[in-house]
Image (spheres, rainbow, N blue to C red):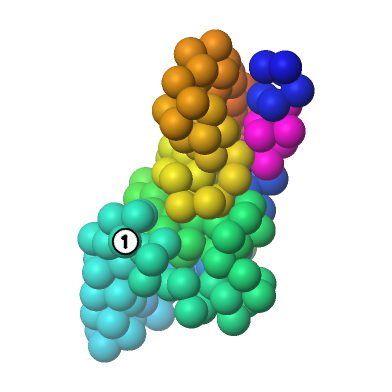
Amino acid sequence: MVTELILPAMAETIYMVVLSLFFSAAIGVPLGLLLVVTGQGHLLPKASLNLILTAVINISRSVPFIIMMVAVVPFTRLMVGSTIGTTAAIVPLSLSAIPFVARVTESAIREVDTGLIEAALSMGASPGQVVRRVLISEALPGLVRGLTLTAINLIGYSTMAGVLGGGGLGNLAIRFGYQRRETAILTATIIALIVLVQLVQGLGNKLVAKLSR
């Protein structure tokens, strides 16, 4: 019985995390890049835009995930037609991860040697070419490291989503482990979460090592 409950819940958690990571990266990485290149003395300095981006990201990061889930209920309903279930949980999961991805992207980009940027510009490269061929290329190991951390955080957030009917391992732990006091299922849920985190971290470490060669 434990396996019959754990495997579908684990699949739901993976579904939520993978899609949330995809959407948060699709928006967060470009935001992080913009945050860097529009900074003073960089490729495309835009003080007003940089100030707005910084404020939006900082405010978004300040909102706890549980509050985020409740606050974006109308937007979630608009996007997926429901506020309950694994698909609905993807909306607040993605929104909560976007500012985090933006910041880890910013951190990875800022680690790129400025000498490489100056060399590319001196050879006639456009700002767009510098972004693609220098910034992203050189920062890729750091980006993968940051996205790995984001995925692990999303696993944790997904369990909180389960408290509000988001499905996955968190929902299973609440319904059976807490409400019905079935210790075996609660223990299995914890083990499944540990396994997921270790798999994600291991995969991330391998990718970073490969990209760093």
- In the depicted view, which residue is nearer to us: 40 or 98? 98
Q: Is 10 colored magenta in this rendering?
A: yes
Position of the C terminus, as image quadrant, is top right
Q: Residue at x 62, y 70 (%)?
A: 82
Q: Residue at x 51, y 78 (%)?
A: 75
- In the depicted view, which residue is nearer to us: 106 or 84? 84
Q: Is residue 176 left or right of residue 106?
A: right
Q: Amino acid at mark 1?
A: Ile
- Answer above or below: position of 49 versus 140: below
Q: Is residue 201 left or right of residue 82?
A: left
Image quarter for residue 76?
bottom right
Q: Is 8 colored magenta in this rendering?
A: yes
Q: Position of residue 151 (x, y in %)?
A: 52, 41
Q: Residue furthest bottom?
A: 48
Image quarter for residue 130?
bottom right
Q: Is residue 26 left or right of residue 122?
A: right
Q: Residue at x 56, y 66 (%)?
A: 83
Position of the N terminus, as image quadrant, is top right
Residue 190 seen anywhere in this rendered image of the structure: no
Q: Residue under circle 1? A: 67
Task: Write the start and end of the magenta stretch as one range.
Answer: 7-12
Residue 96 seen anywhere in this rendered image of the structure: yes
Q: Position of residue 21 (x, y in %)?
A: 58, 51
- How many residues crowd mark 1 within 10 Å: few (<14), some (14–19), many (20+)? few
Q: What count of labels does the image hold?
A: 1
Q: Residue at x 49, y 56 (%)?
A: 93
- Answer above or below: position of 80 versus 15: below
